[in-house]
Image (tube, rainbow, N blue to C red):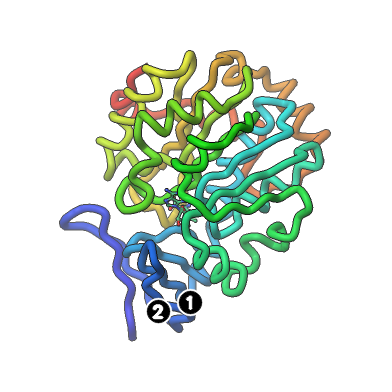
Amino acid sequence: MNMYSESLVEGYGQTFSIDNILFEHKTSHQHLVIFENKWFGRVMALDGIIQTTEKDEFIYHEMLTHVPVLAHGNVKNVLIIGGGDGGTLRELTKHQSIERITLVEIDRSVIETCRKLLPKHSDGAFDDHRLKLVIDDGMNFIRNTGQNFDLIISDCTDPTGPGKVLFSTAFYQACKERLEASGVFVAQNGVPFFQPEELVTSSRKLRALYTDSSFYGVAVPTYVGGLMTLAWATENPALRKVPMEELTKRYQSSAIETHYYSPEAHRSAFSLPGYINNLIEY
Ligand code: SAM
């Protein structure tokens, strides 16, 4: 039987059995593979790192989107950097109150291949009339856009290859300049058990730039190593402390259907265990 092995660190990794390779191609930016696995369904990997699977993607995508949207309470204009599989876009389009979504993906092949082979990820959201799709480097886009956003989501790869720039001070600064006054920046920030340096450096950079920066945790089975962290940064500290009653009211009136997100999961995600908190500069 064919196997797919991923290793973030020397000496440990995870292995998937491959039932069927659906796509494998060296794009102009990265090595893209989509294969089928009995447990996780269709699995997408870039440059040897698992990006998303049909079975557990809802956990990551719901928490990356609904936490900032519902904490903010009045998001109209969103920017997604990366996110070519469409999962983040799908969750955002559930909010009827959002008026505009710009998705900036560096690699057109990821979008085209995922639309074909991971159709449940976007579930038609690439055809949503609110979407503006841009094929560009996220750093280049954010430096040159004249638009401001209520929410910027960095749904990127790890800080190697094309994703590296999306963890730089220059990128965090450029995002801050393009946020509305109460705007929020969130970003995938790796699994601290295996990638502690990523959390140390991102927290230091964000803390130096934003009035309120923090991280929240989410356990995604295929991002092995326990909790992964999602970065949170804003000029409005009140957004992290929206009372439960208000979050519940917003959640109910949004009428979105979720399988992981709940107002309780939202609030508790910001309570991180000691070994993770110790890596963060507050
Ligand atoms: N959920 C995944 C994870 O954390 O493992 C990440 C999702 S994957 C769709 C991330 C996407 O970011 C990829 O499609 C990749 O092409 C895109 N990307 C990487 N660097 C980028 C950049 N500099 N600008 C825009 N998109 C980028």
Numbered disc total: 2
Left or right for 47, reference 233: left
The mark that comes first in sequence, 2 or 1, is 2
Q: Position of residue 20 (x, y in %)?
A: 45, 83
**What residue sits 30% from the left and 50% below the top?**
160
Left or right of 81, for residue 275: left
List the residue tagged with mark 2: 18
Q: Residue furthest left?
A: 11
Question: Residue 258 versus residue 158: which sits nearer the camera?
Answer: 158
How packed is label 2: few (under 14 Cα within 10 Å), some, or many (20 or more)?
some
Q: Position of residue 240 (x, y in %)?
A: 57, 20
Q: Amino acid at mark 2?
A: Ile
* Label 2 – label 1 distance at C-alpha: 6 Å
Residue at the disc numbered 1: 36
Q: Is residue 8 above or below residue 254?
A: below
Q: x, y percentage for residue 236?
A: 58, 15
